[in-house]
Amino acid sequence: MEQPLMKGQKPMEFPHLTAAHKDLMVSLISALETRLDSHLLASSAVPPDVEFYQNDQGTSQGSLHIRRGLPSSHIDFVLASWLHLKVPTGSAMNITNLQAYLKSSTDVPHFQFELVQCSPTYFILFLDVTPRKDLVLYPNYLKTFYEEAQLETLRQRLEQVPETKPYLSSSLYFRGVVSPTGILVSIKCEEVGGTDRCEEIIREHVSPIAHDVMVIWLEKYFSGATVGVTERAELEKRDLLVKTRAIEMDLSSSLPLQFGQEVANRVLDVIKGVFGA
Ligand SMILES: *[C@@H]1O[C@H](CO)[C@@H](O)[C@H](O)[C@H]1NC(C)=O
């Protein structure tokens, strides 16, 4: 049974994912959606031809769902997406994303989740609440959102799984944006266990940890104080840089290559519009 995910939209389906990966996405999105429902606009920010898109051959496909926050809420937008990208070997990578960006009326970190299936036995996970302030200049920010938030315990719990290894992004910029407790790991089950073991790791470790991080983030979101007007300009400036860079790094070059310029422009225009970038 498909659960309704983003209200006011068609259910988000994940046609390319393994059962564990799909269950994780469905449960994570619906948990977020349920908690934030009264903070989000009911209507979709994405036109139908961007909710689902593909290249001419249908070998690369993507799906994008975005709901903006209500004007009265601190939510900028919640974005859920999947990409099925053909690679030269003939196979295709499966990438799923869930992000919640906040407005400058709050300084609570943004929520970021990405799970990339590079091969049936090789995954890369990024899970973080990304800081919006300098942690040296603002030690209280570090204390409130990281030191007192039990995120490090969760990071260490995943570290115990023998198949996980720290993953170093080739982008030094990206490494600088991730929080001190950010989870960026590869999960390889090539030698022992194969796909079954990968499924097990996603079900028994990645999924509960992702849910726990989200619960922590939601608590911070709901208890976060409203930021004074003077502080907002600074947050706004930083957020815009982060969003603009995210589009450049993740999408601006890969989307045209995978989907052709026309489809890519259609998708990028929607994303840029929502990101304000
Ligand atoms: C992505 O999904 C497709 C369809 O389920 C699957 O055949 C493929 O192996 C997956 N890609 C990787 C890299 O595992």
Image (tube, grey):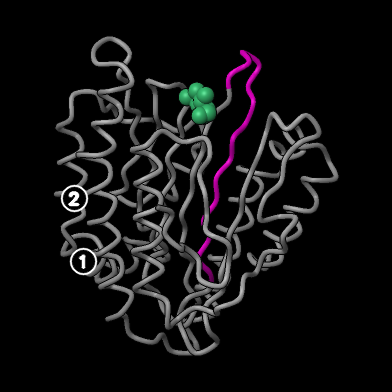
Count every numbered label the image shows and give the total: 2
Residues packed near mark 2 inside 10 Å, few (<14), some (14 to 19) or many (20 plus):
some
Question: Residue 152 got which mark?
Answer: 2
Tell me the kind of residue under disc 2.
Glu
Q: Distance between the Cα atoms at labels 1 and 2? A: 12 Å
Name the image quarter holding the C terminus. bottom right
Query: Would you place residue 159 above or below residue 99 in this image?
Result: above
Query: Tags 1 and 2 in contact by the CB under 8 Å rule?
Result: no
Residue located 46% across and 36% down the image: 17
187, above or below 43, in the image: above
Query: Mark 1 CB in 8 Å range of ligand 1?
Result: no
- Magenta: main secondary structure: strand
User: In front: mark 1 or mark 2?
Assistant: 2
71 sits left or right of 175 in the view? right
Circle number at residue 143? 1
Q: Nearer the viewer, residue 64 or 183?
A: 64
- What percent of the width, then of the height, locates residue 157? 15, 41
The one nearer the camera, 267 or 112, is 267
Q: Earlier in the sequence, mark 1 or mark 2?
A: 1
Q: Tell me: residue 118, above or below residue 65.
A: above
Stretch of the chain drawn in magenta: 77-91
Q: Nearer the viewer, residue 38 or 247?
A: 38
Q: Quadrant of residue 216?
A: bottom left
Mark 1: which secondary structure? helix
Q: Would residue 46 be found to the left or right of residue 232 on screen? A: right
Q: Which amino acid is tagged 1? A: Lys
Hey, which residue is sitting farthest right in the picture?
A: 262
Q: Residue at x 26, y 56 (%)?
A: 213
Q: Residues within 10 Å of mark 1 (few under 14, many from 20)?
A: few
- Report x, y in % for residue 183: 31, 43
